[in-house]
Amino acid sequence: MTGTTVAPSAVLKPDAVRRSRLADPAVGIWLAAAAVIVLGWIVVALAGGQLLTRTNITIILSNSVALGLVAVGQSLVILTGSLDLSVAYLISLGTLVAAETMASGSVLTAVVAVLAMSAAAGLANGLIVTGLKVNAFIATLGTAFILRGWIEDNYTGPAGKVSASFQHLGYDRIGPIPVSIFLLAAVAAVLWFITRRTRLGHHMYATGGDEHAARLSGVRTRRTVVIAHVLCSLCVGAAALFLAARLGSGAPWAGTEARYDLDSIAAVVLGGTALAGGRGGVLGTLGGVLLLAVLDSVFNQLSIDPFFKNVVRGVVIIAAVALYARRGSRRTA
Amino acid sequence: MIRSRLWAPSALLLASALITSCSSDIPPDSPAGSKGAPDSGSDGKQSKFFDQAEYKKQLKLTRAAPEGPDGKPWEQMIEPKMADTAQYKKKGSGGIHLCFSNAGVFNPWRQVGLTTMKAEVKLHKEISEFTVLDAQGKDDKQISDIQELTGKNCDALIVSPNTTATLTPAVKEACGKLPVIVFDRGVETDCAVTFINPIGGYGYGAVAADFLIDKVKPKGKILALRISPGVDVLENRWSAGKAAFDKSELDVVDVKFTEGDPVKTKSVVADAISRHGTIDGVWMDSGATAVAAVEAFEDAGVDVPPITGEDQQDFLQAWKDKKLTAIAPTYPTFQWRTPVIAALKILDGKQVPKKWKLPQPTVTEDNLDQYLKAGMPPLHYAMCGCENLPGFPEAWGKK
Amino acid sequence: MTTATAVWRKRGTAALGAGAPVYALLAVLFAALALTNPDFYEPDRFLAFVKRTAPLVILAAGQYLVVVSGEFDLSVGAVVTAGVVVAAELYGSFPEAHWLVISLALLLAGAVAGLANGLITTFLRVPSFITTLGMMLILEGAVFYWAGGSPHGVLPEDFRILGRGSAFGWLPWAALACLAAGVLAVWLMRSDFGRTLIATGDSERTATLSGVRTHRVRVLAFVLSGVAAALTAILVGGFSGVSAQAGRGYEFEAITAVVLGGVALGGGRGSVVSAMAGAFSLQALFTLLNLQGVSGALESTVQGVIVIAAVGLGAANWSRLRRTRTRSSGGTPS
C-alpha cells in the first residue's frame, strides 16, 4: 500500500505537513457531492420521481450516520498510516453489548460499556500494530477474526432489547433533520478539532506522512498510532450505539452485512485522504459519505438492479481516487 | 486531549437537549421490554432459540391437512383464523400500486423467489405499479426503505424482513399508514394484516432427522452440516434435528459449519470421514452444499450414505442420477406468490388469515420426478410453484 | 548501495529471518496433524489434502508477486467467483464447448482483469488497495448482473477433471497444477523479472534510478495474479461445481497466507516458496481445527490469534536482524 505513495512524500518531507493543508481535497468532494445531488435530482425528476422530498432527505441523512461515524474514525487511523479492518465485527459486538446491557441495566451503563469495550478493542489493535510490529492490515484482520469467533460462539441471533428512551436517537428528527446527524456532527467536530488544532493532530499527520522522520523529530509515533486506533474504535462504538437505537436490539451481523470495513475505507479515500497516510481529513470523509448516501438514494428512486449498483460504486471509487492522484501530481510536479 | 474529553459530554448534552424538543418517527407503543429471548422448555444444551411450544406446534402443523385449492399450495392455508379486512378495501378506481421491501437477493433462493413474485404480479392486470426496494442484506437500509415506501402512495406494502427483531420498529410505523403484509421471516409485532410463512424451521429439521432415524441403523454416525451460526431459521432447523437425534439411537459425531461454501463443505466431509472412519448419514440444514457433500463421499471412494438436502435442482439431479437414499425437506419458494395474492384480497376487503401458514411439502423418492425439471439451472429451487406462471421457464433461467 | 547486492543480501536474510517461522509453523502443524490423526499421512489422504490446498497455494503465489512489488490484490476472490459463474454461464449457452476453450477464455479474462488493475494502479496512480477493492465491487456486480443473479449452466465432467480428477488414477491434477505453478513462480523470481520485481517493491525510487521500468514490472505482476486467480477458479469450479460464492473470502486468505510466509506487506522482502508454504500452513491449520473438533464458531478466533502471533513472531525476528540496516524502507505500519 505504501509502495507508490510514500516514496515521493519522503523526498518532500519537510513540507509534508504544510503541503497537506493546501492540498485539502475536502472542497472537491463536497462539490462533487453537490453535483451528484443536482444531477440525481434531474435524473430522478425525468423518471417521474422526486429526490428531495422530506422523507428522502431524512433517509439520506440517517443513512449517512452509521457509515459516517465509522468513516471519520477510520480517517484518523488511515491519516496516521494505519488501517482498521476490524470495525465491522466491532459494530456487531457493540450493538449486542448495548442491547443486552440495556435489557437489564440503564442506558448510561450501556453507553459506558460499549465505549469501554470499543476503547479496549482499539487499544488492542494499536498495541498489536505498534508493539508486536504486525502490519495493520493483518493485525486488524486478526482481531476481526477473534471478534467474529467471540460473536458466533456467544450469540445465535438478535439479542437484547434497547430501551424506548434510547430509540429516540435512531428515530427522532427536527423537521427533515434526524437528531442522530447531530451525534455525527459532534463526533466529527471533535475529531476535526483534534486533527487540525492540537499537537496530537500534528503528530498524526507527521506519523502518517513519514514515520521515520516524525520519530527523528521527537514525535512519539507509537503512542500516536495507538491513540488513533482508540479514537477510531470509540467512533465505531458510537456507530454501534446508533445502530442499536435504530434496530431496537443487537444484531450479530449488523456490521458485517453492511460491509462497514471496506465501505468505510472507500468513503475515506473518496474523501481525499491518502491511504498511505499523512494527507486528508475528517471533512473530506464526510463529503465522501454523503456522496455515497445520495448515490444510494438515487439508485433507490430509479429502482436500479442491486448488482449494477456495485458496478457503479466500484467505478466511482476508482475514478475519484484517480482524479485525486492527477491533481496531486500536478501540484508536486 | 483534555478539551476533547470535555467536548464529548457537552455534545451529548446538546444532543439530548434537542431530543426533548422534536418530532419522532418512533411508533407510539414502543416495543420496550415486550419480549426478551425466547425461553423455557429447553434442556440447557439446546440453543437459546429453541422454543418448546413452537416446536410442538410446528410438528402438529406438519401433520395437519391444509385448506384451499388442490395443487395450488401457495393459496392453501393450515388452521387459518380469518381476519376481517373491510377497513382496507381500496376506494375509487385506478390501478393498484403495490410496494415491496425486500431484504435482498443475496442467495439463489431469494432470486428464484423474487422472479416468482414478479411473475405473479404480471398475472394481475389490476396492479398498475410494482415498486421493489432492495436492502442488500442491511437492516439499517431496510428500515429506511420501509420509511421511504410508506411515503410513496403505495396501496399495500409487502415486507420480507432481513432480521426478525431489528425491523420490528419500522414495520410498526408502516402499519399505522397502510396495510402491511409480512412474509418469510416474521417481526415481533402482530400489527401486519397477515403474516405469511410456511410451517417453519422446526418442521424442516425434524423431517430431515426423522428420515435419517428411519434409514440409518442404530448407533450409526451422523454428520450434521450447518451453514452458519446465528441465523434464526437455521438455528430452528438444527434444534429440531438435535431434539430428534437426542431421542434416537443415532450418534451425532460432528456438527460443522460450512458457510454455504462447497469447497469448505468438501473439506469438512473429507475430514469427518477420515476422523471417524465411516459416516452413516448426513443431516443438512439447507441444500446449497448438498451436492458438494455427495461428491466428497465419492472422492473419498466410499458409498454415499443417506443424506438430506433441499429442493435445489443440482441436488435433485444428483439424487436421481446417482440413485441416492435421500430426502429434501423444503422451505418453498412458492411462498413468494402468496403475498401478492393476499394484498389483492386485502385491498378487495376479503378476509385473510391473520397467520397464513403455508404447507411445506417434502421431496421424496416417490415424487422426485414431479419436481425435477430437466434443463433448469443448477441453483433453481424446484418448489417454486412457478410452472404455470408467465415467462416460465426462461425467466427462471432455463436455456 | 546498489540494488542487486542489496536485494541478494536481503533475500538471504529473508530466508533466515522471515522464511524460517513459516516452516517451523508448518512442521508443528503437520506434527500435530500426525498426532491427531495418523491416517493423515496415508498417500491418498495426503494427496486429497494437497488437492484441496492447491487453489489457495496458486492464489498465494499470484498474490506474492503483487505483494512483493509493494501492492495488494483484493480482487482475487471476486475473480474466482466471477470465473466460476462465467464458466457456468458459458456452458449454459454453449453446452458442447470444449473444456480447453472455456479454460483458456477464463485465463484470458483473468489476465485482462489483472491488466486493468495494473494499469489503473501504475498509470492512474490509484493505490492498489482501492483499485482492487473497486475491481472487486465491479466484478461481483457485473457478473451477477449479467447472469441475472445466479449462474445458469452446469459445469460438465470434462471441465471438472482438473479440479476433481487424478492423473494415472492417483495423482490429482490439482497437485500437478500447483507444482507447475510453483516451479514457474520460482523460475520467474530467479529471472530478471523477479529481481526487478523485488527491487521495485523494496524501493521504487532506487529501482527507477537503476533503470528498472517499475510500471511495466508491476503491471505484469498484476496480470500474473489475475491469471493465477483464474486458474484457481478453474480448480475450485472443478473441485466443487457451480456456486454463487466460490471465491468468498479468498482475498483475505491469500494475503494471510503470503504474510504467514514472512512476506512483508509493502514489498521488497520474502520468497515465493515461503508464501506457498504459508498457504499450506493455513490449510493445515483449518484441517487441524476441523479434526480436533474445535467448535465451528471458535475456529475463527483461533485463526485470528495464530495469524497475529505468527506474524508478530516474524516481525520480532526481523527487527533484531534489521536493526543495523537501513530502516527507512519498511518501518511504516501499513
Image (cartoon, helix red, strand yellow):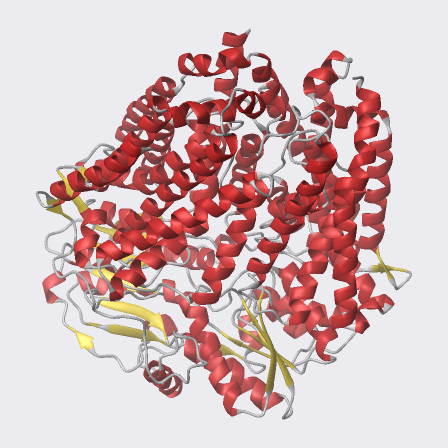
Relative horizontal placement of residue C7, taking residue C215 as reference (left or right): right
Residue C76 in sight from this viewpoint:
yes
* Residue A284 falls left or right of residue B244: left
Q: Is residue C20 left or right of residue A84?
A: right
Quarter occupied by residue C31: bottom right
Q: Residue furthest front?
A: A218
Residue at 70%, 68% (x, y): give it.
B295
| Residue in the foreground of this view, choosing between A284 and C166 | A284
- Please tell me which residue is depicted at 59% across the width and 55% down the height of the picture: C305
On screen, A259 above or below C32?
Answer: above
Along the horizontal axis of the image, is A129 left or right of C91?
Answer: left
Q: Is residue B162 visible?
A: no
Coordinates of residue A98 in the picture (x, y in percent): 31, 57
User: In which quadrant is the N terminus of chain B drawn?
Assistant: top left
How far across and down, in percent of the image, does residue B286 sit? 52, 69
Give whichever of B23, A23 is nearer the camera.
A23
Residue C114, compared with residue C295, is above or below; it is above
Residue C19 drawn at (x, y percent): 77, 43
